[in-house]
Image: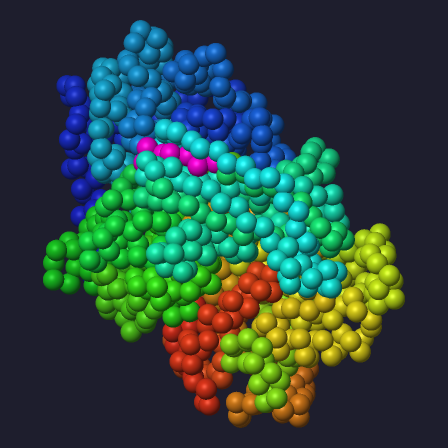
């Protein structure tokens, strides 16, 4: 693994000399005892017994367990040689599939389990120390409370670097001193204001002193610091529940919305029986209310067979004085459904409960009433049953981590990378009395910017002031640059441009928040009355981790076109990635897969040489005059309609021939319905044909099977058998789907109807609605299906709208986190609307298309493709190509991504398009229609009769991509240089 060769000239040499000298001059401010020298502490190296465990499990019940185990799992001898042992954080009563698979694939026997027992945590830590250490001149002692944990997180790597034990206690008693004497401890490093020391003591009462000490230690032991972990210890300490209120509905019977029985669905819509309403109230004195929503599908028998589900159409505050968007979507966005939630299954994989589950935190909504509109789609039932349960918890404060306990994983990763931890509770941002608009007003409602745009100013200024500014100060300290000097910021920017450092975030998007840039497609409008419910539904703005790698953003600028201080385009100096997951188990599993990646590869055979391409339909766009007029009259607001041009297939072939095959991969590619994750079984198709008398005559089973049969769909095979994956499809935070208009006419006679439906119905509702719409459910990549995949430690680029959004999203509703749960090691996905580079082929000399102009462009592109000449890539395809080119140089995933991002705008800024539609899909045609309507006004900016640079799209394309995984991960590539 290598980073950019460091260019050390002139002042750089002086800086390094001064920095190395300061290591020996720095003295911690809180040393107690006589004759203590920091050199004595830095040179300590404990001695382990000969029976170290092969692998360690710790219970997720107590976050201190992971800290106790860390210096056992990762440690260094006096010469800096590393020994690493797998460490798994596990729910021992309900273990995550991710952690079980990680243990199995790494394959080392687990011979130490740290868990709840009759023994106190103090005694557990003492037993570990006595069992696995022969001698240790020092011990790290952490106070057993929230404050101790807050200090213990950044301090734990110290124990790994010095090979010393960690002891958790509330006081230094006889048991403690007995063990310390037995080990020969002369120095105690104390984390906690209420603990006294033992013998020579270094006592830490704030994280800044710990950070300074760790910096000096790492520089002394290893040289340069190349890795910083940002995390928030607060995520392990949920607020107390002071009270709760429970609500349950009757059993609702609603008409199925599935188009497999189209007449039944239309009749249900006409009579209002397709939907049901359920209301509940937030008690008056609940300032911080955690709302837990469960919608149960009481007819789940055919979920795995047909893809049936229940979902939310709208869920908002029932108050006519509130903005309309809050009345429809404040509580939950449309598209949230049981297929976006993992099903509860028995040991054989059979569904016990199919349900939508979501959690929402509300601020200052005491006394408010909320109403939910729910629906269901059952492909073979005319009527289905649902029931709603709601629990409203009164919290003592708003600091409720969605991804609980992730901070407990940070020391293990950081110690492995020889880094330092920057951890502060102050990083967290939630709606509360201190989160004010520019006018000084509070922002009642949803807890994050996603569905509370009035929070944008407070949120983003918090990121600038509470995280970015302190991070820059830390970076300046490491580089020995004085930011108070006139050109200090420029020097810092130039230094890290040449010498980038890894910055890894471990935590959810509230505990360590992202900046949220404005976005013309989903604007951060403080005047909420101007925002539609559809705009609010999937979240406003462009959430991004980019700012943590950007040294010199213009302070306070989070506009769509936000630039930097010293470069023409925004530029990322440092290397950024984020660990996020359903819980600490999933993140622990991903870290273990990353650390033991090459051990795993040895067991996977030829898997490492395979790559997969899945490209969805519905990305080709034309503007034929007559059909476009029909499209506008029937509600479509895009500047074009979904009609075949060959663009998607040429783009897929280009990626195969010019990106993945030159990397040495054997590539499997699938387009449209062939790229579906799964298809219908023979039994399922027979059942669909026998639904009613009409179906017996109009459902051509063998014809339908050619498009959605289980032997046609290759998605699962590609996902599980590929080391590198590029997936391009319409999506949302909860799913992405591969099929386009090609299935709209399925289920009603044969090829003639299909052809006509594909070219006529694609002009209505954005090209998502038709008799065959319901047949995509079985094959969509949704949380419920994806979490069951058994994927290898792959690298995946997911080019699909909104899939990378985690802020304001319940973790188990996130499709990106489901992919990580399934085994992906590094995922790059987008947090807002992704862009299609027109969806047409050149030459295209005018706005409107004719059959002849489209056919001519396709013929030219096809002839050129035979000579391996392809149209230039743009947007996500271009970023992916450039990242893969960097990976071929043996760069890490984070550095390759950073370099690709930095050249994107200079490369693509001047390209022009007739239009650039987004890749949004909900799997619900009415919802998709509302999404099409919301972008109408925005597309007028792109030019109606001429090409445009769509520069705002390119900026949010630059901002939106997020790397989920270790940025220092270096994946295997067959032809790597």
Q: Nearer the viewer, residue 921 or 711?
A: 921
Residue under the image location 16 percent in, 55 percent down: 483
Whether residue 396 is in magenta: the answer is yes
Which range of residues does the magenta coloring cover? 391-397
Quadrant of the rendered structure where residue 92 is?
top right
Report x, y in % for residue 791. Answer: 63, 48
The answer to whether 926 is drawn above or below residue 236 in the figure is: below
Residue under the image location 65 percent in, 68 percent down: 769
Q: For residue 118, say whether it is visible.
A: yes
Q: For residue 609, say whether it is visible.
A: no
The answer to whether 494 is drawn above or below residue 43 in the figure is: below
Using residue 246 as the reference point, say whether residue 195 is left or right of it: left
The majority secondary structure of the magenta stretch comes to strand
Report x, y in % for residue 300. Answer: 70, 43
Residue under the image location 34 percent in, 56 percent down: 321
Quadrant of the rendered structure where residue 46 is?
top left
């Amino acid at each position: 693994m290598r980073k950019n060769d460091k260019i050390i000239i002139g002042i750089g040499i002086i800086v390094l000399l001064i920095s190395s000298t300061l290591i020996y001059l720095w003295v911690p401010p809180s040393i107690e005892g006589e004759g203590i020298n920091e050199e004595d502490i830095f040179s300590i190296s404990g001695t382990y017994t000969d029976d170290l465990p092969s692998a360690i499990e710790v219970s997720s019940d107590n976050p201190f367990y992971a800290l106790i185990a860390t210096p056992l799992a990762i440690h260094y001898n006096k010469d800096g040689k590393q020994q690493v042992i797998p460490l798994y954080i596990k729910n021992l009563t309900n273990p995550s599939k991710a952690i079980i698979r990680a243990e199995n694939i790494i394959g080392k026997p687990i011979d130490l389990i740290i868990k709840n027992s009759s023994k106190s945590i103090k005694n557990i830590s003492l037993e570990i120390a006595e069992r696995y250490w022969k001698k240790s001149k020092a011990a790290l002692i952490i106070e057993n409370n929230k404050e101790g944990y807050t200090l213990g997180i950044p301090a734990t790597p110290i124990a790994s670097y010095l090979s010393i034990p960690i002891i958790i206690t509330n006081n230094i008693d006889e048991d403690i001193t007995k063990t310390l004497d037995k080990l020969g401890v002369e120095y105690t490093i104390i984390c906690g204001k209420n603990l006294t020391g033992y013998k020579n003591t270094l006592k830490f009462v704030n994280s800044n002193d710990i950070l300074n000490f760790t910096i000096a230690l790492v520089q002394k032991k290893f040289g340069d610091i190349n890795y910083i972990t940002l995390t928030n210890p607060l995520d392990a300490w949920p607020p107390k529940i002071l009270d709760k209120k429970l609500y349950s509905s009757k059993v609702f019977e609603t008409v199925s919305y599935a188009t497999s029985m189209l007449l039944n669905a239309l009749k249900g819509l006409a009579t209002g029986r397709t939907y049901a309403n359920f209301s509940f109230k937030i008690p008056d004195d609940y300032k911080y209310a955690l709302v837990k929503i469960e919608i149960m599908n009481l007819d789940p028998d055919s979920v795995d067979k047909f893809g049936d589900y229940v979902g939310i159409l709208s869920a908002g505050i029932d108050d006519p004085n509130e903005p309309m968007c809050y009345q429809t979507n404040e509580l939950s966005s449309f598209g949230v459904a049981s297929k976006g939630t993992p099903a509860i299954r028995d040991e054989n994989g059979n569904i016990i409960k199919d349900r939508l589950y979501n959690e929402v935190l509300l601020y200052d909504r005491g006394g408010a009433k909320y109403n939910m509109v729910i629906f269901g789609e059952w492909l073979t039932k005319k009527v289905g049953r649902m029931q709603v349960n709601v629990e409203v918890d009164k919290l003592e404060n708003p600091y409720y981590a969605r991804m609980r306990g992730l901070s407990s994983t940070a020391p293990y990763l950081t110690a492995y990378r020889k880094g330092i931890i920057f951890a502060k509770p102050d990083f967290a941002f939630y709606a509360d009395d201190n989160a004010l608009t520019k006018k000084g007003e509070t922002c009642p409602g949803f807890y994050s910017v996603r569905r509370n745009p009035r929070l944008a100013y407070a949120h983003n200024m918090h990121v600038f002031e509470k995280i970015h500014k302190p991070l820059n100060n830390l970076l300046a300290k490491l580089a020995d640059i004085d930011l108070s000097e006139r050109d200090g910021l420029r020097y810092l920017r130039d230094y890290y441009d040449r010498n980038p450092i890894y910055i890894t975030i471990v935590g959810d998007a509230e505990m360590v928040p992202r900046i949220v840039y404005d976005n013309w497609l989903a604007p951060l409008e403080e005047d909420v009355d101007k925002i539609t419910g559809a705009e609010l539904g999937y979240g406003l703005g462009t959430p991004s981790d980019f700012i943590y790698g950007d040294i010199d953003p213009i302070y306070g600028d989070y506009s769509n076109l936000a630039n930097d201080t010293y470069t023409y385009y925004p530029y990322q100096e440092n290397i950024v990635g984020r660990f996020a997951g359903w819980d600490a188990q999933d993140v622990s599993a991903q870290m273990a897969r990353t650390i033991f990646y090459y051990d795993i590869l040895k067991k996977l055979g030829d898997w490492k040489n395979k790559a997969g391409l899945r490209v969805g339909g519905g990305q080709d766009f034309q503007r034929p005059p007559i059909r476009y007029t029909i499209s506008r009259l029937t509600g479509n607001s895009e500047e074009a309609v979904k009609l075949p041009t060959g663009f998607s297939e040429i783009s897929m072939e280009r990626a195969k021939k010019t990106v993945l095959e030159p990397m040495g991969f054997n590539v499997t590619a699938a387009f449209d319905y062939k790229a579906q994750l799964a298809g219908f079984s023979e039994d399922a198709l027979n059942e669909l044909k026998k639904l009613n008398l009409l179906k017996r005559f109009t459902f051509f089973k063998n014809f339908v099977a050619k498009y959605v049969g289980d032997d046609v769909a290759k998605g699962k095979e590609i996902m599980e058998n590929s080391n590198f994956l590029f997936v391009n499809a319409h999506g949302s935070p909860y799913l992405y789907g591969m099929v386009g208009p090609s299935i709209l006419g399925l289920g009603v006679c044969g090829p003639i109807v299909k052809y006509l439906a594909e070219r006529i119905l694609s002009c209505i509702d954005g090209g998502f609605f038709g008799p065959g719409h319901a047949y995509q459910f079985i094959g969509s990549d949704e949380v419920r299906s994806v979490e069951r995949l058994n994927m290898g430690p792959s690298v995946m680029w997911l080019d699909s709208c909104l899939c990378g959004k985690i802020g304001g999203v319940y973790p188990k509703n996130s499709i990106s986190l489901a992919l990580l749960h399934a085994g992906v090691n590094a995922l790059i996905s987008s947090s807002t609307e992704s862009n299609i580079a027109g969806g047409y082929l050149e030459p295209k000399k005018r706005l409107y298309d004719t059959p002849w102009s489209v056919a001519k462009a396709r013929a030219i592109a096809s002839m050129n493709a035979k000579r391996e000449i392809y149209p230039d890539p743009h947007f996500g395809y271009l970023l992916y190509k450039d990242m893969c080119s960097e990976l071929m140089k043996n760069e890490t995933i984070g550095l390759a991504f950073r370099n690709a991002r930095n050249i994107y705008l200079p490369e693509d800024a001047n390209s022009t398009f007739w239009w650039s539609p987004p890749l949004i899909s909900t799997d619900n045609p009415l919802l998709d229609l509302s999404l099409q309507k919301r972008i109408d006004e925005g597309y007028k900016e792109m030019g109606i009769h001429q090409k445009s640079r769509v520069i705002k799209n390119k900026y949010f394309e630059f901002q939106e991509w997020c790397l989920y995984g270790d940025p220092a991960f270096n994946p295997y590539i067959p032809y790597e240089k």
